[in-house]
Amino acid sequence: MWKYIKRYLPYAAAAALFMVGEVSMDLVQPGLMSRIVDEGVLGLKAGGGLGLIGTLGLQMIGLALLGGLCGSLNNVFTHISSQNMGNEMRKDAFRRIMSFSFPQMDRFGTGTLVTRVTNDITQIQTFISLFMRGLIRTGMLTFGSIYCMFRLNRDFGLIVLCAFPFAAGCIVLCLWKANPLFSKLQEQLDAINTVMQEDISGVRIIKACVRELYEKARFGQANGALTETQTRVLMIFAFMNPAVNALMYGVIAVILYWGGFQAAAGGVTPGDVMAAVTYTTQLLNGVLMLVMLFQNISRGLASWERVKELLDSEPELKAGGFSGGTKQRGEIEFRDVSFTYPGALRPALEHIDLTIRQGETVAVMGATGCGKTTLVNLIPRFYDATAGAVLVDGVDVRKYRWQALREKVSVTLQKAELFTVPIRENISWGKPGALAEEIASAAKTAQADGFIRAAPEGYDTIVAERGMSLSGGQRQRLSIARAVIKPAEILIFDDSTSALDLKTEAELYQALRESCPGITKLIVAQRIASVRQADRIVVLENGRIAAVGAHQELLAGCKVYQDICRSQVGEEDELV
């Protein structure tokens, strides 16, 4: 955590100094009050009276104002430090998440990542601010009050000192019981966030299947577990606070009882007894603050361990140092490539050998689960091949810098990912700063210009969250426009036209051939209608290449392709 603290150490040091000033003013006040009582009110010393009361009263007011100013400035510098530390920590955590591979994202889970970047870092911010403010205040109030008690009267100091270990023991016992629950609390918060994320994103299917009651029960179960753990923590501290209060008020009673005897014998003055009671009250406040401080420290450290695990996680896929600059443009080669997903029992791809030339349109077909998406995901290095090598423009993709490789590749997926911004911005996401003419041209190629212009505000229409204001086909066409506008050398369509009708799809591919003749195109599809015009069609079966050829060649000699065609004979007839 020092990495973040040291950046704002001057602010933290200023906060500490102002806190010292605030507590010092608090510790001076009881001594002045003692003099007001003994010298001003009771007249135990010469020179007392109303004049002394006024003088000391003004001093107390001045010291109180100065202490308040120091306290305010302490708050200012504490918040500057903690908020900026949290800001840096949150940005670093998000950057680390953005560098994770897909398997790493799956291992953490969306719910826990959201919790760690939001709630956990908020807990750390609270811990840092309370540590800077509370540690100094608590320490000075506690030990300063005991010291001042000894200065007043050794017996008063011994009475407080005898009670202090019991208070500390009570705090340690409660924290020992509560500390393991803080990590559990954050894990249960992960579970709630996971359920929330799944249910909000899948609310349509929940309503369609009439599963609202089931999801309410599932959320209630997760929320109930969190409530139970939180209640256990609160019950522990509910016992501790009254116990410490009772102990310290017992100390006040003993001081008053003993002080009465001492005052009668002339050993102490009434002002000393009053000051001792005030110091004991300050000590009580310090102990109660210590309870809250240790509670927040325990919870903050538990959250820090979770955030630290995230920050210390190294990306599984390391970028190379190659920045591009090859003679080839858009050439892809798979050299004896095999790939197995983490934890899977069998490979998704085995011994793939395939070369795709610049400007060529190659389709990939096969049964569900045969490895089509896995094959194209290896090109932009969403995953790394477990054996063999994938080359782009003659260079192993593992040698490329991330930006250099992914600038060469434009990808559009079956599930269109859209953002809650205008349509224009969703398309220009592929090319920031694109001109209006370029955006419109990409939309026309994607067969999206018509429905965009028919929208209430045209290209400036705001897209609803996750694109829910659009149909499936419209979302896919916007994603295709975003991929087309990107100045890439390789264009990958991963079943991204599945929601389009045959006529629109045919017009799309015709527009692509005319507008992107030199771009290498890979089309993953389920329909023969989507791939029959491709230069070559790669047929996958159980993770291996069963055949490669043009449509007519495969119809004549590939049984797998023939089976696919027979299953779609209606669509083939429609095309013919």
Image (cartoon, rainbow, N blue to C red):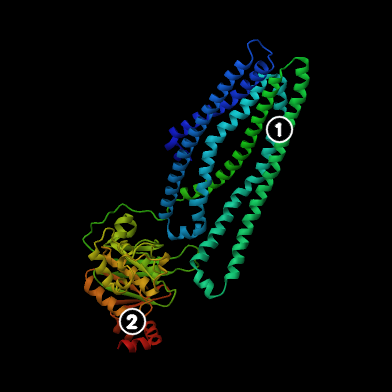
Question: In this figure, which residue is indicated by the disc labeled 2?
Answer: 502
Confirm or deny contact between disc 1 and disc 2 (CB under 8 A): no
Q: Residues within 10 Å of mark 2 (few under 14, many from 20)?
A: some
Whether residue 81 is visible: yes
Disc number placed over residue 89 in the picture, else none? none
Q: How many marks?
A: 2
Residue 318 coordinates in the image, percent (x, y): 38, 53
Which callout, 1 or 2, points at the residue further toward the start of the chain? 1
- Relative to the observer, which residue lies in front, 55 or 463? 55
Question: In this figure, which residue is indicated by the disc labeled 1?
Answer: 248
- Relative to the observer, which residue lies in front, 48 or 523? 48
Secondary structure beneath disc 2? Answer: helix
In the rendered view, tell whether residue 552 sits above or below residue 119. below
For badge 2, the amino acid type reads: Leu
Whether residue 24 is visible: no
Q: Residue at x 34, y 62 (%)?
A: 380
In the rendered view, tell whether residue 227 sits above or below residue 554. above
Which of the 4 image quarters holds residue 298? top right
Q: Residue at x 33, y 89 (%)?
A: 573
